[in-house]
Image (tube, helix red, strand yellow):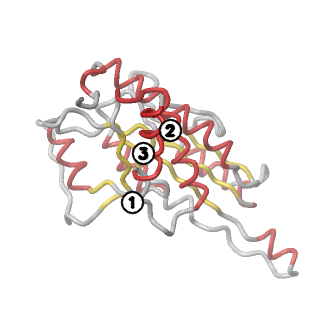
């Protein structure tokens, strides 16, 4: 048990150390707790890695590997997708050419008109933080077409997500018309609907609320990869 505790502390303290300083502190706390939970449950059955970005060159390399008859292209080696909470992976075998994301997290705050109203100022046009999600979603969905899960989650909060706001339908469109505030991990209709999970409301999400959702997504993603590729494919070397 002592060694397991030590491993948990080591992972919680180092796996998330590449997280950008510009990210929400709450997201960092959530990721650390998720890592602790995964380490407690799976121990040396998995090796966890956290990245703050996924380079397009690496996505395209994997797509070319899994879809050799399809043409793929990108322009610059430096281009990447950078989710707010980064990407949490489990590592495959040393010579594996694929990556195995178990959690891709975004956190978006949109809407200042409630504060402007308190200050007696006129309303502004609603922001575009949600629209910026679109590019990432297209790239991430393409990157994970080979799998039957899409471990993406976005937490949004702010007055733009009040129940009477038309912005909610922009989010629903990005969610492929799935319900908001519901976890969609496994793809539906033979993979046609790789929706992801979109949690949106006016009030800010607490750390505990986000941990519960993200832990569930990450844990079930690990079990999915175990089922598809076998546990030995991910087990840490002794």
Q: Nearer the viewer, residue 42 or 201?
A: 42
**For the residue carrying disc 2, how many other residues have a C-alpha within 10 Å: few (<14), some (14-19), or many (20+)?**
many
Q: Earlier in the sequence, mark 2 or mark 1?
A: 1
Q: How many marks?
A: 3
Residue 237 vertical placement versus 61 (above, below)? above
Residue tagged by mark 1? 18
Q: Quadrant of residue 76?
A: bottom left
Q: Is residue 188 left or right of residue 66?
A: right
Q: Quadrant of residue 100?
A: top left
Q: Nearer the viewer, residue 147 or 92?
A: 92
Residue 31 position within the rendered picture, expressed as x and y whole percent measured from the top left: 52, 47
Q: CA distance from mark 3 to mark 1?
A: 12 Å
Q: Earlier in the sequence, mark 3 or mark 1?
A: 3
Residue tagged by mark 2? 196
Using the image, tell me which numbered label, if any, was put on residue 236: none
> Regarding mark 1 in the picture, which secondary structure is present there?
loop
Residue 140 position within the rendered picture, expressed as x and y whole percent measured from the top left: 37, 46
Point 42% across, 34% down: residue: 3
Tell me if I can see residue 67 in this picture.
Answer: no
Point 52% across, 53% down: residue: 106
Point 70% across, 49% down: residue: 206
Mark in front: 3 vs 1 = 3
Quadrant of the frame with the C terminus: top left
Q: CA distance from mark 3 to mark 2?
A: 26 Å
Residue tagged by mark 3? 11
Q: CA distance from mark 2 to mark 1?
A: 24 Å
Tell me if I can see residue 108 in this picture.
Answer: yes
């Amino acid at each position: 048990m002592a060694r397991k505790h030590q491993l948990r502390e080591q992972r919680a303290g180092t796996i998330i150390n590449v997280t950008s300083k510009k990210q929400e502190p709450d997201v960092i706390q959530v990721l650390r707790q998720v890592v602790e939970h995964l380490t407690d449950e799976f121990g040396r059955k998995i090796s966890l890695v956290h990245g703050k970005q996924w380079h397009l060159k690496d996505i395209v390399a994997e797509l070319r590997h899994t879809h050799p008859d399809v043409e793929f292209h990108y322009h610059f080696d430096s281009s990447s997708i950078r989710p707010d909470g980064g990407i949490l992976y489990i590592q495959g075998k040393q010579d594996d050419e694929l990556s195995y994301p178990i959690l891709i997290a975004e956190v978006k705050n949109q809407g200042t008109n409630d504060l402007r109203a308190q200050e007696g100022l006129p309303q502004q046009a609603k922001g575009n933080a949600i629209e910026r999600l679109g590019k990432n979603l297209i790239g991430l969905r393409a990157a994970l077409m080979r799998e039957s899960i899409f471990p993406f989650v976005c937490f949004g909060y702010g007055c733009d997500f009040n129940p009477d706001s038309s912005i909610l339908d922009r989010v629903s469109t990005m969610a492929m018309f799935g319900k908001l505030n519901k976890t969609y991990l496994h793809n539906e209709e033979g993979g046609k609907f790789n929706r992801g999970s979109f949690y949106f409301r006016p009030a800010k999400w607490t750390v505990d609320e986000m941990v519960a959702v993200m832990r569930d997504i990450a844990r079930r993603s690990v079990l999915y990869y175990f089922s598809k590729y076998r546990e030995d494919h991910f087990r840490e070397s002794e």
